[in-house]
Amino acid sequence: MIGRLRIGVMLTLLIAALACAANESGVALKADSIKSEPFKDADDVGDLKKGDSVQIVSKKGGWLRIKAPAGTGWVRMLSVKRGAGGGSSAAGELGGVAAMSTGRAGTGQITSATGVRGLSEEDLKAAKFDAAELARAEGNAVSAAVASAFASAGKLASQNVAVLPEPHPATTNEAPRTGRQ
């Protein structure tokens, strides 16, 4: 009897913990559209305003499903700061921007410094070459003439960019280079 009671209490605590974790709070870092699906071209269901409090319901790739004053739907992960809001300072906002740009926000378990944040280490390890997807992506290529016509229609002007000089090895009287160049 006591064993069943312990199991019941543990299950209740586990369910309560999962419910709390599933609805994490956050604050909108910037204005963004709330989408019906986690896609850039999905229909808008509302507008998120900077500073709005949100409930984070789930995560999918680089998108968060949220509940906000303007509606429930999907926003880009970088539009929301996880955790409670409560006031804003210039230093806090600069810290948030710095954290986003360096990839050092959140848990510190960074698996990739580029691309879409939200890919787990398992996702990256399980990634496999897919010739059909590569062919599909290459099918989106356009000719130089089509690209030029598109640029002209958008009133874009070409610019020549100088080629970088070849790197040269350090001489013995130069200090060794460290860090990012």
Image (cartoon, rainbow, N blue to C red):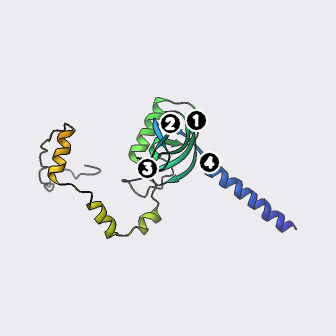
In the image, residue 33 lies at what x, y percent?
A: 46, 39
Q: Give the Cα distance between marks 3 and 1.
A: 21 Å
- Please tell me which of labels 3 and 2 falls first in the chain: 3
Foreground: disc 3 or disc 2? 3
Q: Amino acid at mark 1?
A: Pro
Q: How far apart, in angstroms, are the residues tagged by discs 4 and 1?
A: 15 Å
Mark 1 or mark 2: whose residue is earlier in sequence: 2
- Residue ID at (42%, 64%): 124
In the rendered image, the vertical position of residue 32 relative to residue 139, given as above or below = above
Amino acid residing under circle 4: Asn
Q: Secondary structure at mark 2?
A: strand
- Name which residue type carries label 2: Leu
Q: Which mark is residue 69?
A: 1
In the visual, does 56 lie left or right of 134?
Answer: right
Circle 3 is placed at which residue position?
39
- In depth, the one of 59 and 46 nearer the eye is 46
Specify few, some or many for label 1: CA neighbours under 10 Å numbering under 14, 14-19, or 20 or more.
some
Q: Residue at x 14, y 44 (%)?
A: 161
The mark lying in front, picked from 4 and 3, is 3
